[in-house]
Image (spheres, rainbow, N blue to C red):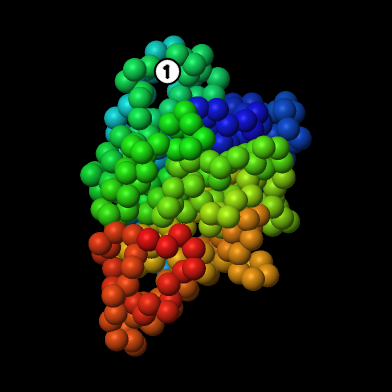
Amino acid sequence: MRKLLAATLTACCVLTVPAASVTAADVTASHGTRAAGGSAGIGALARAGQWQLDALRLPEAWRRGKGRGVLVAVLDTGVDARHPDLAGAVVEGPDLTGAGRGDGPWGHHGTAMAGLIAGRGHGPGHAAGVVGVAPEARVLSVRVTLENGDPRREQQPPGGHDALARGIRYAADHGADVISMSLGGGSGTRDGSAAEAEAVRYALGRGAVLVASSGNDGDGANRKNFPAAYPGVIAVGAVDRRLQVARFSNRQDYLSVVAPGTEIVTADGAGSYVVSDGTSPAAAIVAGIAALVRSTHPDLSPYEVRTAIEQGTGRRPPGGHTPAYGHGVANALLALRAADDRLSAAAGSPARPFPRFGPGRGVAVPARRRCRRHSP
């Protein structure tokens, strides 16, 4: 389930939870196990299962803002805007796969990722259902790949050629502040592709922050994964509830940070929930953090946003970086504080030429603050 194929999704969804027939046991059950029960309280149970909210210190971070005014492009299998937790959050973009919806599965993985980024919950006070890291952000849905279980994936529709590269460009041209890519191997090669690399550079130049999952074969081949490996992309690995790196999470020198990626409860389809493991949910969570930083500090460039996220981590490893942990465990509150520090340093220092990704919407900051990795 954690294999990476051409355009394969990096999440491993382990338990689907239909809204009409679940109990608390569904949210905490072992992989593949379902308990019988009624529908009462499913939204509350889904919220209770979101252990990452406290781990990321989101209640404190939300005092600063919840992502209002930020558009996050979700390049995935499509986002189902009918899910109650995403009502009013989704902007429909194009389907670049060339496959059409047809009779195959559609939008499950993309909806799950969108829920982690900008889920609003539902019901009185929006207290039920899943809430994303940036619940006031909007999601731009761009379909660039098919679900893992869709047999059409192997047919490689002509219209789907370079879908990821075209999706990145579309998102950048349509105002995306953050581009979330919980997928890997989109070009069909482990070496990446020139079209994707150029699209990444283009989006960074337009001021978009790019986030991608590091991959799920860390306990096996541990291969380099694109788009995470492209320079300038925030590459995200996964940790468990103990904030220990998950066995499946890829270890690579270009890893930026790690984030919650096991037993993650999120949206699935039009009205259900799913519990998933993988670097996909971890990447979506960090995309949400990027949205919070961009919302509260709109003048920061993509490079500065990435650096704030990398500097604003908990459990920083010895030496400041390792292939397993990156710069540490992502933390929404600490990322916002690191962004504050960057602006304070810029305000108190003479402006100097500062190499960064993109012309930015940013301010000049001292060259000594430059991050040692992913140099422009």
| Quarter of the figure that contains the N terminus | top right
Q: Given the image, on which type of amino acid does mark 1 rest?
A: Gln
Which picture quadrant has residue 222?
top right
| Quarter of the figure that contains the C terminus | bottom left
Q: At 46% across and 69% down in the image, what residue appears?
A: 371
Is 245 rendered above or below residue 14?
Answer: below
Image location (x, y in percent) of residue 280: 55, 41
Q: Is residue 310 visible?
A: yes
Q: Which residue is mark 1?
A: 156
208 or 370, which is in the foreground? 370
Numbered disc 1: secondary structure: loop
Is 6 rendered above or below residue 129?
Answer: above
Q: At 45% across and 59% down in the image, what residue appears?
A: 374
211 or 100, which is in the foreground? 211
326 or 279, which is in the foreground? 326
Q: At 32% across and 20% down in the image, what residue appears?
A: 159
Q: In the shown orientation, is residue 22 left or right of residue 64?
A: right
